[in-house]
């Protein structure tokens, strides 16, 4: 296991469709984070898990967004009824507990037409 | 809410021309300040963590310093491969999220 992997790397969808992204963290990391990044901006926090428990959610995470981490391993981020404003890079990161040293994946770029 | 402001937004340097990037922050109870490097189309890559004023960390041509209100990332004699966006982030004792700035986009010209 060499790092955080995300799938798919790119997704183009039509407005109103649902999309799901998957993240596989570094195996020994118990924390998993989702961030969103748009062009020219820094990453914005969406949510984080410690093991299987979702412990924090940002106000940015509307009810169209849902994240899961069953069994404390991989995680999925689903966006329902996508809107053009959802177009962004969705970044997943993992870490050991009590460290801010996040290891990021390559990201999943979403384009909503 | 934690706030991070980075300046300058963009910087063009000649190879070998040293410079500094600034990260000003407002946070209630700083737990840590982080520097990341991000290449186009890729996720951020961790560089440094600083915890208290006066602390310094070095890695190759990069040196990060921290005061009570800001951090600097000094790039000494940069090379073209140092071209990237450098992101600064902070975390406080009240939560476990990193609050990022917009980044400093650095281009080093051969």
Image (cartoon, rainbow, N blue to C red):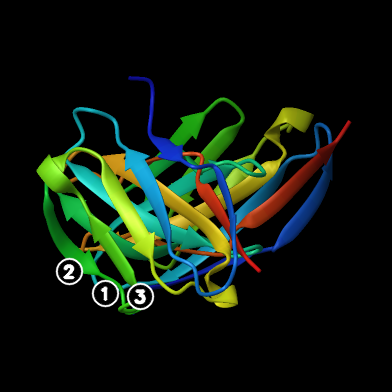
Quadrant of residue A73 in the image?
A: top left
In the rendered image, residue B57, in percent from the top left (x then y), is placed at 43, 37
Alpha carbon separation for disc pair 3 and 2: 26 Å
Q: Which residue is mark 3?
A: A64
In the rendered image, residue A85, in percent from the top left (x then y), is placed at 56, 76
Q: Pointers 2 and 1 in contact (CB under 8 A)?
A: yes
Dot 3: element: loop
The reply, left or right, for residue B70 in relation to residue B97 is right
Q: Residue at x 52, y 43 (%)?
A: B43
The reply, left or right, for residue A16 in relation to residue B54 is right
The reply, left or right, for residue A88 in relation to residue A30 is right
Looking at the image, can residue A25 be seen? yes
Task: Give the tally of numbered discs.
Answer: 3
Query: In terms of depth relative to the viewer, which is nearer, A80 or B41?
Result: A80
Dot label at residue B28: 1
Q: Which residue is mark 2?
A: B94
Query: In terms of depth relative to the viewer, which is nearer, A59 or A65?
Result: A65
Nearer the observer: mark 3 or 1; the answer is: 3
Dot 1: element: loop
Looking at the image, can residue B55 be seen? no
Alpha carbon separation for disc pair 2 and 1: 8 Å
């Amino acid at each position: 296991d060499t790092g955080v992997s995300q799938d798919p790397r790119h997704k183009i969808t039509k407005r109103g469709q649902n999309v799901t992204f998957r993240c596989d963290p570094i195996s020994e990391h118990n924390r998993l984070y989702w961030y969103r990044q748009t062009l020219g901006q820094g990453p914005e926090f969406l949510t984080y898990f410690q093991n299987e428990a979702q412990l924090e959610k940002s106000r940015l995470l509307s009810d169209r967004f849902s994240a899961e981490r069953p069994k404390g391993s991989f995680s999925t981020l689903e966006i329902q009824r996508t809107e053009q404003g959802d177009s962004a890079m969705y970044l997943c990161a993992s870490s050991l507990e009590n460290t801010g040293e996040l290891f990021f994946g390559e990201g999943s770029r979403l384009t909503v037409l | 809410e934690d706030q991070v402001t980075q300046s300058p937004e963009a910087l063009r340097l000649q190879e070998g021309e040293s410079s500094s990037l600034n990260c000003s922050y407002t946070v209630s109870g700083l737990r840590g300040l982080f520097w990341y490097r991000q290449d186009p189309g890729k996720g951020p890559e961790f560089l440094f963590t600083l915890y208290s004023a006066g602390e310094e960390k070095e890695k190759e041509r990069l040196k990060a310093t921290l005061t009570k209100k800001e951090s600097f990332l000094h790039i000494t004699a940069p090379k073209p491969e140092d071209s990237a966006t450098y992101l600064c982030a902070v975390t406080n004792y009240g939560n476990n999220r990193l609050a990022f700035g917009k980044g400093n986009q650095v281009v080093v010209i051969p």
